Amino acid sequence: MIRHVWTAALVLVGCLALPFTASAQTGMGWPDPANMFPGQRPQHQQPILDFPTDEPLPGMADVRAVNYQSPLGQPSFQNDLTVMSPSDQVEWIEPDYNNSPVHSYREPIYDRPLTNVPNDEPYEWTMLPKGMVYKSYLAGPKESRLAAHLMKITDDNWMLDGTLGGRFGVMRYGRDSTFLSDGIQWDVEGAAQVRLDIPEDVDVRSVDFRAGTQLTWSYASNPRHRSRFGYYHLSSHLGDEFLLKNPTYPRLNYAHDVIIFGHSYYFTSRLRVYGEVGWAFYNLESDPWEFQFGIEWAPNEKTGFWGEPFLAIGTHLREEVNYGGSFVVQTGWAWVGDIPGRTLRIGLHYHNGDSTQNSFYDNWEQQIGFGIWYDF
């Protein structure tokens, strides 16, 4: 009986002394499996840190840095230090936080300049630049573009209004962007805007001619703001077929030469508001002042094959009609290709106000129809 008591006491004392012995050996309170059999410790197993340090830490003489560009093994954890094993080697892949699930489903908020070119990209001179700094107004009835409207005019016939023209840059001091270009650019424009009377053997009822030039620029401190200053000449003419069928209709020599200043502001890369004032230093049948303003929601960057929806609302006021004018709404689908800002659109067209053909400038028209536009 006494022998059993002494044996139990010795076992109890040994159990109590074991933690203190292990603490003196490892400094951690429990045996270190890596130090229990030092003669059989694998040479490739070295503890590493996942943070940079130049100073050795106490009790961590075996800690070494790891080059994350080299192949690493599957990590295991030992004594709060990561130990790498050569088995099942894989390459280290840097995490990509931009494509994480948190960001993959939401569109980035536009709290930065509307240009994907680095801010330190230098401006340079370019002849015949491919992009635009200031985009034409989508709902502007007299902008130079390529377009066709098939429409019914209230109390009149079905008409085909066509615009044959365009606008291109001659010279730019600036830089390209996946959005509109940055810098200052000189553009020229021209267009013939013709109206064909479909039931009357598709006769030419009238045609307006526009030609002009403009200086456009963005603001380096905030490319959301963009401006244009320029000049254009517009003259209107009745068609020969129309005059032959209506010999008593008064022919108007409508013409003016206008200085314009316009400004746009982009809330996002798709949403902009604009306003423009024009003053004619020479005018016949017309009066000097005109005003434009509107809002647009449309793509300006490459859309791909499927395109994106658009909506454009614009108003054009003219002094010769007591500051009445035209109210235009267009909506449909739009595509942008490799050249930012150049947009192909198809959709519905609605106009209410004075005629968009200036030979009939004092006639009220309501137009409802379908349109195709290529804008610059």
Image (cartoon, rainbow, N blue to C red):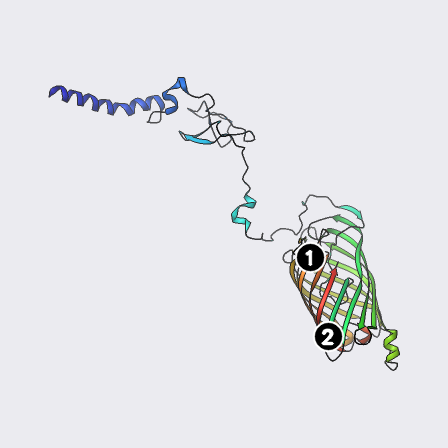
In the rendered structure, the answer to whether residue 105 lies left or right of residue 292 reads left
User: Which residue does the numbered mark 1 point to in the structure image?
Assistant: 335
Examine the image and state in which quarter residue 97 appears: top right
Q: Nearer the viewer, residue 137 or 333?
A: 333
- Picture disc at residue 33: none
The percent coordinates of residue 46 (x first, y second) are 46, 24
Q: Is residue 47 positioned above or below 276 on the image?
A: above
User: Which residue does the numbered mark 2 point to in the structure image?
Assistant: 152
Q: Is residue 11 positioned above or below 356 on the image?
A: above
The percent coordinates of residue 125 (x first, y second) are 79, 46
Residue extending furthest left? 1
Q: From mark 2 to mark 1, how far is it between C-alphas?
A: 26 Å
Disc 2 crowd rating (10 Å Cα; few below 14, some 14-19, many 20+) is some
**Tag 2: residue type?**
Lys
Examine the image and state in which quarter residue 292 appears: bottom right
Residue 287 in view here: no
Tell me, yes or no, whether the two marked residues, 2 and 1, touch with CB atoms within 8 Å. Answer: no
Q: Nearer the viewer, residue 6 or 56?
A: 6
Which residue occupies 20% across, 21% down?
Answer: 10
Local secondary structure at mark 2? strand
Q: Quadrant of the C terminus?
A: bottom right
Local secondary structure at mark 1? strand
